[in-house]
C-alpha cells in the first residue's frame, strides 16, 4: 500500500483491496494472485484455515490448477478450510474418540514453496508495525456493526497432544456475554489537514469524494461548464458558477438550485462568501461588489442595479485612479474576513507598459474606493515567476493568513509552474512536488497544512494524464515522494479542464 502519510497507509490496510501481485510481476502464474488474496483476506474467516491448505493451494498453482476456496465443517464441530481444484478434500479420521485431520502426504519439492512465502513475507510484513491484529481499526475510521460485539469473559487455551504423526486438538471452552442493543456510532471519515470531503470538477460535472479518494460520487449531470467551487460553513452546501449563474448543491437533499443569475452581464467571474457567511464578493464583468450574504434576497437579484440597492452593500465601483479600478477575475477572503485578495488584470508593476494578471491584497473595510488600502501586490516587483512571459495567472488560492498558491500558464489553457508566495516576507518559491511542469488549481486545506493540486506531466506530451494530489505543505521541497489520489483510469477526459476543487472542513 502506498500513500502520503502513515495514517493514510493504515486506512488502506483496512479498507483497500489487497494489491494484485500480477500488476508488479505479470510473469507469475495467474493463480498466485488468488492465493495471496485468500491469505490476506480482510475477514479472517475467509483466509486459509491452516498452513497446510496454503501449501496445497501453491502446489495447485504450480500444477496449473485453479484455486477455489470455501469453508467446510468436519465431524466434531471443528471448522477447516477446503481448497478445491486438487481432487478430494483432506480426509478426517477418529483417534481416541476425537476428530482429527489426517496429515497430508509428502509431495515433491516445488520452487513456488520458496518464492511465494518470500513474497508473502514482504507484502504482509509491511503492515505488522501498524496493527497488532489485521482487523484492528485505526483512530479515524470506525467499522460499522449492527450490534455491540460479544465479549469473551473466560477462555481456556486449547490442549494439543501428539498421537503418532497426527495432532489431536481439543476445542476451547468460551463463555460469551449476551449481545446488547447499544447504538453504534456512524463510521468516521478520514481527516487530513482538517478536511474530510473534496468537491471538484471533472468532465464538466461536480464530483464528491472522501479525502482519501473513497466514496467517489457524481453530483451534477447537466454537462455545463462549472467553476469557483466553495463549501459553505454548514458543511452541506457547495456553491459554484455555471455560465452567468451562481448555483448551489445540497448534499443532504441531492438537489441543485439557482442562487443568483445575471443574464445581462458579460461574465460572472467570482462569487466568494466570507468565512462567517455574512458577506459575498461578486465579480460581474470583472467589477466587484460586496453585499450581505442573504440567500432569499440574492435569489431575487438579476442585475447590478439591484445589487446597488441592497441595504448594507459595499459597492466597490471602478473609480478612476483608485485600486478599485482593477478588473477583478477572482477573489478570496482572509480568515478574519477583514482583508480581501483580488486576482485582476492591470498594469504590471515591474513593466508598466504591459498588462499582467496579478494579485493584490486590500483592506476594504472603509467601503469607499478612494479609501481602499493596498497591503501587497505580486508578482509585480517582488519576483519573476518561471513561465510568466505571457503574464497570465490562471488561478490562485489563499490560506487566509500568510501564504498564496498560484500557477502560471504554459500549456493546455492554464497549466504551468506552481508557486507559493508569502506576502509577509515577500518571498515566492517555485514548487515541484511531483516533478517539473505542469500544475494548476492549488487549494489550501482550512488549517493551511495540506495542499491539493492537479498535475500533468509535460514530458509525456499529449499522453499526459490529469492527476489529483493532496500533500503536506511542510514536506514540499524536502524530497518527499507523493502519490496521487486514486481515481478510475482515464477519469479526467479534457486535458484543458481545471479541477476547481473545494475542501470541506471536517464535520463533527
Image (cartoon, rainbow, N blue to C red):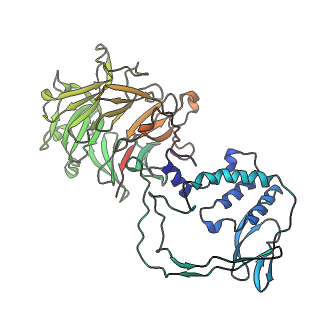
Image position of 336 (left or right of 461): left
The residue nearer to you, when weighing 122 against 481, is: 122
Q: Where is residue 143 shown, x and y percent of the image?
A: 48, 64
The residue nearer to you, when weighing 411 against 167, is: 167
Q: Residue at x 76, y 50 (%)?
A: 115
Q: Quadrant of residue 164?
A: bottom right
Relative to 163, does residue 455 appear above or below in the rendering? Answer: above
Q: Where is residue 427 shown, x and y percent of the image?
A: 34, 25
Q: Residue at x 41, y 67 (%)?
A: 185
Q: Quadrant of residue 459?
A: top right
Image position of 403 (left or right of 367): right
Image position of 441 (left or right of 131): left
Q: Where is residue 327 shown, x and y percent of the image?
A: 26, 27
Q: Where is residue 68 shown, x and y percent of the image?
A: 73, 64
Furthest toward the right, the residue is: 108
The residue nearer to you, when weighing 315 against 257, is: 315
Quarter containing the C terminus: bottom left
Q: Residue at x 31, y 39 (%)?
A: 244
The residue nearer to you, when weighing 141 against 67, is: 141
Q: Quadrant of residue 356?
A: top left
Amino acid at each position: 500500500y502506498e500513500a502520503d502519510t502513515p495514517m493514510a497507509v493504515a486506512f488502506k490496510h483496512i479498507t483497500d483491496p489487497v494489491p494484485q501481485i500480477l500488476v508488479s510481476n505479470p510473469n507469475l502464474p495467474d493463480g498466485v494472485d488468488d492465493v495471496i488474496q485468500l491469505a490476506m483476506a480482510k475477514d479472517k474467516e475467509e483466509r486459509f484455515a491452516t498452513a497446510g491448505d496454503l501449501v496445497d493451494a501453491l502446489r495447485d498453482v504450480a500444477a496449473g490448477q485453479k484455486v477455489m476456496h470455501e469453508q467446510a465443517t468436519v465431524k466434531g464441530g471443528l471448522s477447516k478450510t477446503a481448497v478445491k481444484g486438487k481432487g478430494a478434500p483432506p480426509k478426517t479420521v477418529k483417534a481416541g474418540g476425537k476428530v482429527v485431520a489426517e496429515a497430508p502426504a509428502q509431495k515433491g519439492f516445488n520452487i513456488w514453496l520458496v518464492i511465494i512465502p518470500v513474497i508473502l513475507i514482504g507484502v504482509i510484513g509491511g503492515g505488522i508495525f501498524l496493527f497488532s491484529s489485521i482487523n484492528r481499526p485505526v483512530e479515524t475510521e470506525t467499522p460499522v456493526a449492527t450490534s455491540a460485539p460479544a465479549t469473551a469473559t473466560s477462555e481456556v487455551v486449547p490442549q494439543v497432544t501428539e498421537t503418532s504423526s497426527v495432532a489431536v486438538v481439543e476445542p476451547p471452552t468460551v463463555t460469551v456475554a449476551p449481545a446488547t442493543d447499544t447504538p453504534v456510532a456512524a463510521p468516521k471519515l478520514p481527516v487530513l489537514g482538517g478536511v474530510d470531503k473534496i468537491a471538484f470538477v471533472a468532465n464538466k460535472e461536480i464530483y464528491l469524494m472522501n479525502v482519501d479518494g473513497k466514496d467517489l460520487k457524481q453530483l451534477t449531470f447537466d454537462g455545463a461548464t462549472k467553476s469557483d467551487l466553495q463549501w459553505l460553513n454548514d458543511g452541506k452546501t457547495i456553491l459554484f458558477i455555471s455560465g452567468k449563474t451562481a448555483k448551489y448543491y445540497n448534499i443532504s437533499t441531492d438537489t441543485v438550485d439557482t442562487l443568483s443569475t445575471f443574464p445581462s452581464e458579460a461574465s460572472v467571474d467570482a462569487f466568494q462568501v466570507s468565512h462567517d457567511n455574512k458577506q459575498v464578493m461578486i465579480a460581474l464583468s470583472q467589477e466587484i461588489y460586496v453585499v450581505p450574504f442573504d440567500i432569499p434576497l440574492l435569489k431575487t437579484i438579476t442585475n447590478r442595479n439591484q445589487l446597488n440597492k441592497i441595504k448594507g452593500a459595499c459597492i466597490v465601483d471602478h473609480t478612476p485612479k483608485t485600486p478599485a479600478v482593477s478588473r477583478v477575475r477572482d477573489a478570496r477572503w482572509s480568515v478574519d474576513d477583514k482583508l480581501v485578495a483580488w486576482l485582476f488584470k492591470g498594469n504590471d508593476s515591474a513593466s508598466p507598459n504591459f498588462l499582467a494578471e496579478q494579485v493584490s491584497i486590500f483592506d476594504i473595510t472603509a467601503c469607499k474606493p478612494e479609501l481602499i488600502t493596498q497591503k501587497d501586490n505580486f508578482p509585480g516587483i517582488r519576483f519573476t515567476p518561471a513561465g510568466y512571459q505571457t503574464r497570465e495567472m490562471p488561478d490562485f488560492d489563499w490560506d487566509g493568513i500568510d501564504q498564496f498558491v498560484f500557477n502560471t500558464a504554459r500549456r493546455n489553457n492554464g497549466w504551468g509552474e506552481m508557486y507559493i508566495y508569502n506576502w509577509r516576507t515577500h518571498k515566492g518559491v517555485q514548487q515541484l512536488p511531483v516533478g517539473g511542469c505542469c500544475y494548476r488549481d492549488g487549494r489550501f486545506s482550512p488549517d493551511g497544512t495540506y495542499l491539493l493540486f492537479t498535475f500533468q506531466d509535460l514530458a509525456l506530451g499529449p499522453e499526459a494524464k490529469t492527476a489529483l494530489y493532496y500533500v503536506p505543505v511542510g514536506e514540499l521541497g524536502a524530497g518527499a515522494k507523493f502519490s496521487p489520489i486514486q481515481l478510475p483510469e482515464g477519469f479526467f477526459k479534457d486535458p484543458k479542464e481545471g479541477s476547481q476543487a473545494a475542501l470541506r472542513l471536517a464535520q463533527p
